């Protein structure tokens, strides 16, 4: 298991980012593995929605772990799962939840610096204590800061960027292995953060946020796709169903031919 953690860690190279096309179950994991993935990552939104739950730790931990077990059974690639806020009210509970994921084969986790249902960030020292508890299990911790959540580029003040950099230092000292800064697309700010922090930086891809090559040039070490693949798959499914119910179009048609059955 330690080997997979180290293999996963080695994939995080600033300037040559690991691409994670997020999945939600064993079937979607198989598809992404077959497409050439180097590692597998779940996204909490898709995992929860696929089971009829809402994002934000609405999905019971037991179901998260059962889903992980099924994903582990279909691939030998390193797997990182989205643990949201760590599935625990206390650092001790976070450690227990993380240890279960690691024991089942997870090489890494994502962990946020706010609690479920809350918009306010935890104080850096409180978030760091939770990160330290998770990191003590030996798993790769991708520490997510939601400092840019709900912010527009005009809100990207020097103080906000400095807060993110300060949090990165505190999280690194606590044992974090990577800094995840979602909702950020400003290239100047991304470059500034990549240069200022010691941790590899993970950016959430989205329309208008740049190509892989452009983000690599800024020093990004990891690019993930979040709930985008889930949303695209569900959109495709809905479109296909609408076409079939309307009596129009060939089922499973897609640009360039037919989907293989």
Image: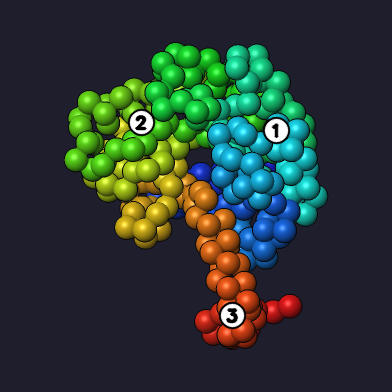
Quadrant where the C terminus sits is: bottom right
Relative side of 154 to 228, left or right: left
What residue sits right under mark 2 in the picture?
A: 147
The answer to whether residue 54 of the structure is visible from this angle is yes
Near-viewer residue (209 or 246): 246
Instruction: Report the residue at 66% width, 46% height from top.
Output: 52
Q: CA distance from mark 1 to mark 2?
A: 26 Å
Q: Of the residues tagged 3 and 2, which is closer to the observer?
A: 3
Q: Secondary structure at mark 2?
A: loop
The answer to whether marks 3 and 1 mark residues whose Cβ atoms lie closer than 8 Å is no
**Res. 145 image quadrant:** top left
> If you read the primary sequence from the N terminus, does the residue marked by circle 3 or circle 1 appear first?
1
Find residue 155 and report its image quarter: top left
Q: Residue at x 27, y 48 (%)?
A: 187
Of discs 3 and 1, which sits in the foreground? 3
| Quarter of the image where the N terminus is located | top right
N-terminal label among 3 and 2: 2
Residue 109 marker: none
Place of residue 154 in the rendered image (x, y in percent of width and height, measured from the top left): 19, 40
Write down the residue under mark 3.
Answer: 246
Would residue 39 be seen by someone viewing this image from the given angle?
Answer: no
């Amino acid at each position: 298991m330690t080997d997979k953690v180290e293999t996963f860690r080695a994939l995080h190279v600033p300037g040559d980012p690991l691409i994670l096309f997020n999945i939600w179950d064993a079937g979607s994991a198989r598809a992404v593995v077959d497409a050439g993935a180097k590692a597998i990552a779940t996204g909490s939104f898709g995992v929860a929605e696929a089971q009829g739950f809402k994002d934000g730790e609405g999905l019971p931990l037991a179901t998260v772990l059962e889903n992980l077990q099924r994903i582990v059974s279909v691939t030998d690639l390193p797997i990182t799962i989205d643990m949201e806020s760590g599935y625990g009210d206390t650092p001790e509970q976070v450690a227990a939840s993380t240890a279960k994921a690691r024991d089942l084969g997870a090489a890494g986790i994502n962990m946020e610096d706010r609690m479920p249902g809350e918009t306010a960030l935890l104080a850096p020292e409180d978030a760091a204590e939770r990160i330290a508890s998770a990191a003590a299990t030996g798993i790769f911790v991708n520490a997510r800061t939601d400092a840019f959540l709900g912010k527009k580029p005009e809100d990207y003040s020097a103080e906000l960027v400095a807060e993110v950099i300060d949090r990165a230092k505190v999280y690194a000292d606590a044992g974090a292995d990577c800094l995840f800064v979602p909702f950020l697309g400003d290239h100047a700010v991304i470059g500034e953060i990549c240069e200022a922090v010691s941790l590899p930086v993970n950016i959430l891809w989205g329309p208008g946020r740049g190509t892989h090559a452009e983000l690599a040039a800024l020093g990004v070490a990891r690019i993930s796709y979040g709930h985008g693949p889930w949303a695209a798959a569900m959109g495709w499914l809905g479109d296909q169903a609408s076409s079939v119910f309307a009596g129009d179009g060939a089922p499973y048609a897609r640009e360039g031919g037919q989907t293989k059955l």
